[in-house]
Image (cartoon, helix red, strand yellow):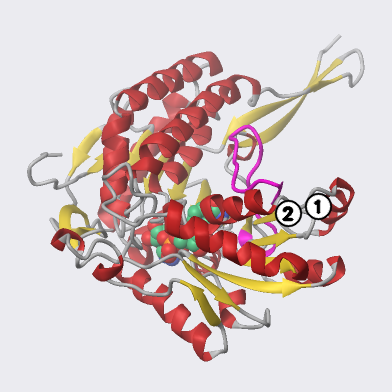
Amino acid sequence: MTKKELILSNIIHGEQQPPSSQSYFDSVNPSTGSVFAKIPASNKDDVDAAVYSAVEGASSWGKLTSAVRADYLRQIHDHILLHGQELAKLETVDNGWVIRETEYGLIPSLASIWLDAINAAISGTKGETINAGEDIVAYTIREPYGVVAAIIPWNAPLFTFTIKAAYALAAGNSIVVKPSELAAVSSLRYGELINEILPPGVLNVISGDGKDVGAHLVSHPLVDKISLTGSGATASAIARSTADSPKSMILELGGKSPHIIFDDAAIQQAAFGLTLNGIFTGNAGQLCVGGSRIYVQRGIYDEVIAAVRQIVSAEIPLGDTENPLSAMGPIANAAHYNKVRSYIELAKEEGAKVLIGGHSGGEVVHPDNPKLAHGYWLEPTLLEVTSNKLRICQEEVFGPVATIQVFDTEEEVLALANDTEFGLGAGLWTNDLHRANRLIRQIKSGSVWVNDFRRVGPELPFGGFKKSGFGTDSVAEFTRNKTVYVKINQ
Ligand code: NAD
């Protein structure tokens, strides 16, 4: 990478490789709307080179002892912490995710995943033995798959890269990572740094579009396992393209997570949770688990809205993403900016009422800062709805936009919460732990938080129900069992 021009290369077999087409995509800083870097527009030849490199990488990496692999992961952990500020800044500029969250939230969470993977490399790859008779030795080996294709989205590149790479490598696989064509800068640099530690071929990064490069990678006959974080549409496309030669897949997909606030909840705590951890901060609501549907029991409805309004105006200043005082950045790219704004317009046409925000453009940030005038800015937006059937309540908007709806009874709100094709997360706000316990069992989602939201620890699974996907990026899912019976001849 040359720092002045910021023209990035693929990372194949431990080396920077320009795309064989010599073509590049522009990377745009969403705060300013200006191009700040160029990323490879790779083609199928580049994919083939990355996969062949990974095949070679897997053959040596997979033979190392768990302890040696764990030691490599420890070195990666230390190395990325050393470069944490640089990585945080790249993620901020590439993605619009404020530096307050990338430097102080994201980088420590990457480090904790690498730390967990060090343990997992040793304890998560142990097989089992059974007593099958005195002349039989019976055991399982947890073997790596071989080559993993990791397809990652634009909204949280370094996090999704890490959760896949750390556990795939811990299990003994090599990996080809394909970041999104909309935000690949931080991933290409991350791949470069990790390759300063790993032997060549073990981790490769290739930048390109989804329909050619991504599709060629996942259907490549030498790829053994796929891990996708992305949309349902991409999951379906991958399932179709691999239908004749099925592969094991982890699918981490979208969400439409509900918050349920009962009238016995600590209202201020709930209001903080559903704004600051729920939907508006956290990459401007562009997180899969964003709590975009808020249901409030009738007796406290007005009080919750007043508390949210106060928190939004006092605690969520939009602003220059590189300024640590800014709490929320822009929408990450132009196409998505238009999509999110069109959802707000559609909701209004369908009868939703804007209670908070709703405005977009340079004037909602710092009108006196011309640098930000052409960024993709959108205010935190709260829309009051009276029906769950509105498209804004059913489809993933993926931005700082939430709906709020009143309810009366537990049965009613349970039905509303589950009335979605997604099932990623849910937030329950109540001081009645009996009620919380009842609802935890009945809510159809992969995670439930009680009086809390969006806390994710690498030691526990984070996955989806229904159209939010299946499987989780964990060491167990990057290994497969081989069962062995050995008859000891007398
Ligand atoms: P997307 O599905 O459009 O793209 C994701 C990746 O898939 C990109 O790298 C893209 O180039 C690639 N791709 C597209 N078509 C492909 C194909 N046919 N074959 C192979 N690869 C292909 O998703 P996005 O817009 O980048 O990301 C947002 C989505 O990701 C949202 O739905 C969000 O909820 C989801 N997400 C889920 C989680 C989770 O943990 N469940 C986390 C983050 C994001």
**Disc 1 element:** helix
- Quadrant of the image for the C terminus? top right
Q: Amino acid at mark 2?
A: Leu
Q: Residues within 10 Å of mark 2 (few under 14, many from 20)?
A: many
- Quadrant of the image for the N terminus? top left
Whether pointer 2 and pointer 1 mark residues with C-beta atoms closer than 8 Å, the reply is: yes
Q: Is residue 460 magenta?
A: yes
**Disc 2 element:** strand
Give x and y (percent) for residue 72: 42, 19
Give x and y (percent) for residue 199: 34, 24
Q: Residues within 10 Å of mark 1 (few under 14, many from 20)?
A: some
176 relative position to 437: left or right: left
Give x and y (percent) for residue 454: 59, 47
Q: Which residue is mark 1?
A: 440
Q: Residue at x 63, y 25 (%)?
A: 125
- Number of callouts in the render? 2
Q: Can you see residue 372?
A: yes
Tell me which label, 2 or 1, sits earlier in the chain. 2
220 relative position to 79: left or right: right
Q: Residue at x 61, y 75 (%)?
A: 393
Q: Amino acid at mark 1?
A: Ile
Q: Is residue 253 above or below residue 73?
A: below
> Ligand 1: does it lie within 8 Å of the C-beta at label 1?
no
Q: Which residue is mark 2?
A: 428
Q: Residue at x 63, y 45 (%)?
A: 462
The residue lying toward the viewer, choosing from 176 and 97, is 97
Magenta residues, start to end: 447-468
